[in-house]
Image (spheres, grey):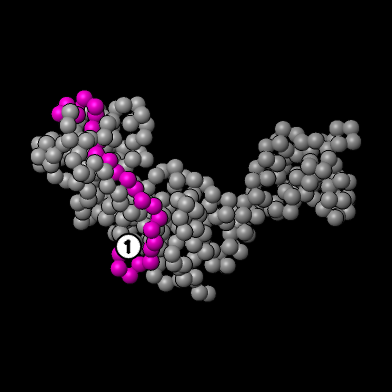
Amino acid sequence: MQAPRVTLEQWRTLQAVIDCGGYAQAAESLKRSQSSVSYAIGRLQKQLGVTLLRIKGRKAVLTEAGEVLLQRSRQLLADAVNLETLGQTLESGWEPEIRLVVDEAFPAPLLMSALKSFEPLSRGTRIQLREVVLSGASEALLDGADLVIGYQVPQGFLGDTLLNIEFTAVAHPDHSLHQHNRELSANDIGHEMQVVIRDSGSRPQDVGWLGAGHRWTVSSIATAITTISSGLGFGWLPNHAIERQLQEGTLKPLPLRGNQSYSAQLYLIFGRQEGIGPATRKLAEILYQACGNTPTEQPPTESK
């Protein structure tokens, strides 16, 4: 690969001439002599083989080519600063990437709010986000995920309650189950089709009421909502995910006898059993704050 002939300092000098309004002002800003600034710009133009500046009155202005190259140079210098910052960040133990795995039942607005709060504090840490269902969260921990939101804290992992999710049995208002005009028994439900969401793990688990003999299985909560809203079957869905459908009347809670709804706890689980890095700890803290929760135990810090 060919090495660049132009230095970052030369691009910085060009930016100073434009931003400060001239050679003399740039020299003062850079704490250099005006002749050294002029020499740097002249050498830059010679190395590139293109005229970047022209004098208009007493002010140096960009040529058309100069405008294009100046804009690119600003990004170049910003990238160089970010690269140095990243190096310092890694040296301090701040993780370059967090593998975040979240059960689909976790409210998306809360997740996006947390990630938005984390981004300006991330110091360049990348987020690798993956959504799973049920046992897919536990398997992600075994596969090396850094932070997981799931229904169970496997033995040997550190986790704490993050959020309670309420589920309600619903169907379209025109569904036959709503035509009984009475409380529904297990026998009533057992003769109808239930829409269930596929467990993404390799060893699927059954969660919730699954008494119907006839099931259709879908891969996501969104698909389950669409299916049930269209009049196909009934199902248990997270309350936060069906607020709009309940308001619009495309879904209606079933009057089940004794168990119209149930709740399930989601936990925030650390993937590492030893010390946990500062970026992962910060993201966990923000997730707890987004859910209005506080962990009962503090994870161990990463030793250096």
Q: Position of residue 300 (x, y in %)?
A: 46, 71
Q: Is residue 268 visible?
A: yes
Specify the quadrant that holds the N terminus.
bottom right
Front-lying residue, 103 or 44:
103
Q: What residue sits 49% from the left and 70% below the top? A: 301
User: Where is mark 1, residue-wise?
Assistant: 153
Closest to the observer, 225 or 217: 225
The stretch in magenta equals 154-180
Q: What's under tag 1, amino acid-wise?
A: Val
**Is 221 colored magenta in this rendering?**
no
Q: Is residue 20 above or below residue 134?
A: above
- Mark 1 neighbour class, 10 Å CA radius: few under 14, some 14 to 19, many 20 or more: many
Using residue 47 as the reference point, say whether residue 169 is left or right of it. left
- The furthest residue to the top: 174
Res. 229 image quadrant: top left
Q: Residue 45 placed where, x, y %?
A: 75, 44
What residue sits 46% from the left and 67% below the top? 298
Q: Residue sitting at 27 percent across and 47 percent down?
A: 262
* Whether residue 228 is visible: no
Task: Tell me the residue at 67%/37% (across/down).
Answer: 68
Q: Nearer the viewer, residue 118 or 233?
A: 233
- Counting from the top left corner in percent of width and height, residue 204 is at 20, 53
Relative image position of residue 114 (x, y in whole percent): 49, 49
Q: Quadrant of residue 121?
A: bottom right
